[in-house]
Amino acid sequence: MTRRSCAIYATGIVCAHLLIVGIALVVAQVFQTMINSRLKQEITLTEKSQMFESWKNPPPPVYMEYYFFNVTNPEEFLAGGKASVKQIGPYTYREYRPRENVTFLENGTKVYALNPKSFVFVPEKSAGDPEVDIVRTVNIPFVAVMNELNSYSFYVRPVVSMYISSLGIEIFMTRTVHEILWGFKDPLLSKIRKLKPDVDEYFGLMWKKNGTHEGEFVFHTGEQNYLDYGKIDTWNGLRKMSWWSSNQSNMINGTDGAVFHPLIDRNELLYIFAADLCRSIHLAYVEDVEVKGIQAYRFAPPNDVLMNPKENPTNAGFCVPAGECLGTGVLKVSVCREGAPIVVSFPHFYQADPAYINAVDGLNPNKEEHETYLDLQPTTGVPIRACKRAQLNIILKRVPGFPKTKFINETIFPIMFVNETATIDDDSASQMRTLLLIVTLVSNFPLLIVGLGIILLLVLVVLFCRNRQKKTAKDDTAYTQVSDKLDDSSEKPANQPMKNGSYIAMSPVEAQKC
C-alpha cells in the first residue's frame, strides 16, 4: 500500500468518526444540556455563587429622575375649568440600595434581607436646583383631611372648612421641589397633631424614605428549583396581602425586579412585586434589543395590567370596595397608603383611558419617554437595562361642606412622576460578553466537530480523485507491435543491414479525467 493510499484511508476514517460523533452530539444536545445544567447550579443566591455578591451589592448605578407638574391655572380649575399643567424636571438622584442583614434560612434554600435605599442629588443630571425651584401643586395634606372628613357628619365639615380657611390654607400650595420631595412642616398637620399626637406634622412625597427600606423580604435562593431563583417567599412576614378584594389580587408573585431565573423564554410572563404599588405586576416579551454589545429580551407591562375590569375581569380584585372601579390605566392605592385618595398610573397617563388624558391640558403620553421596560439577558436572566416609570396622582372632587370645591369637576390630578433607570456598567458588560462567548463556543462545539468533518470529507474527495486520475493514466497506456518486415513499397537503404527480430513502439493514450 502506497503512502498516498494510507493518507486517503486515514482521512476517511477520521472524517467518518468526526461526522458520526458531531451529528450524535448535535441531536442529543449534550453540550447545550451541560451548559444549561451548569447555569441552573451556578445562578443561585448562595454564598458560593458568583451572582450572590452582585445581588448583595448591585454594581450598576441607579438614578431616580423626578418630574413635577406645575399647575398654571389654579383659579380657573377651581371655578370649574380644565386644569393646565407644565412639566418641570428632571431632578436626578443617585440611588444606593445594598442588601443588609443577609441571613440564610432553611439549609440555604431561602435568604432574608433588608434593602435600605439612600439618595444623593446629582446636579449635572438635573434641570435645576431643587432647593430653589418652585412648583405649584395640589395641597395633598388638605385633600387628605377632606377625604377623611367624608365619613363625618355634614355639620362638622363646614366648621372645619372655615377653620382651615382662617389659617390661609388653600387647595393648591407653592413649595420648593426639595420640600415637596423630602418634607416640610405642614401648618394643617401641625394643628391636627395637637389633637392627635400620633399624626406626623411633616409631609413629603419621599418623607422618611431616605435611608429606610420597604419591608423585610425572604427570597428563594434557587437551590431547589432554578425557576424560583430570586422569587419572594414572604414580605413583612406575609405570603399574601389583605388590602384587595380577591385572593388573586392579594398574591405576592415574582421577584423584586433585581434578579430573574436563567434560561428565559420569550413566551413566558415575568412577575415583579412592587411594594410601592402594593401589588404584583406581570411583564411580557416585546422585542429583541442590544445593550453594550449584549443581546437581550425586552419585557414590558402589557395593556391588560391596568385595564378596566370590564375588559379584563381579573383586575376586578383591585377595585376597593368591590365594584368601585376606576377606568383603564389607573390604580387606586389609598387602600395601602392611608390618607389622601392616591392613584398611580404610567407617566402622562400612558396606556390609560383618553378621558384622563383629555381632562388636563399639558399631557403628552408616548412610548419612548413613558413606557416601563426591562431588558434581560436570556441565558443568565441578568437585567442589562431597566426603566421603571410611575406617576403619582390624586383624586380631586367636590366635597360637601367645603365651599372651595363646589365647582370642581372630578379629576385624577397628576402630581409628579419618577423615571427609575439602571444600565449595566462597562466592567460588568465586558465580563458578561466574555461569559456569553464561552457559553456560545461550548454550546456550538458539536457543530464545530461536524464542520471539521465536512472539511475532511472534501479533502478526502480531492485526494481520491487525484489518486484515481494517476492510476487511470498508468493502466490505460497503449502497447503496439510492429512487423519485422519492411513494407514492400518502402526502399531499403543500401548500406543498412537487415534487423533480426521485432521492436515495440509505445504510444501513450490520453488519460481519463476524474
Image (cartoon, grey):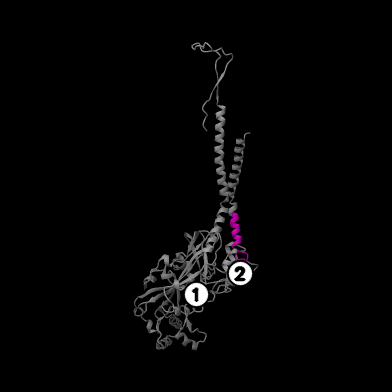
Amino acid type, callout 2: Val
Residue at image point 45% right, 85% down: 188
Range shown magenta: 33-49
Which of pointers 1 and 2 lies earlier in the amino acid sequence?
2
Which residue is more in the foreground, 388 or 244?
388
Position of residue 291 in the picture relative to residue 446 (left or right): left
**Residue 113, visible in the rendered structure:** yes
Return the residue found at the far right.
107
Per the image, the residue denoted by label 1 is 120
**CA separation, marks 1 and 2?**
28 Å
Viewer-proximal residue, 442 or 110? 442
Residue 301 lies, in percent from the top left, at 47, 65
Marking on residue 111: 2
Q: Determine if the magenta segment contains residue 44.
A: yes
Residue 232, visible in the rendered structure: no
Residue 184: horizontal and vertical position, in percent? Answer: 46, 82
158 drawn magenta: no
Kind of residue at badge 1:
Val
- Toward which corner of the image does residue 187 lie, by quadrant? bottom left
State the image quarter where residue 353 is shown. bottom left
Picture layout, residue 407 above or below residue 418: below
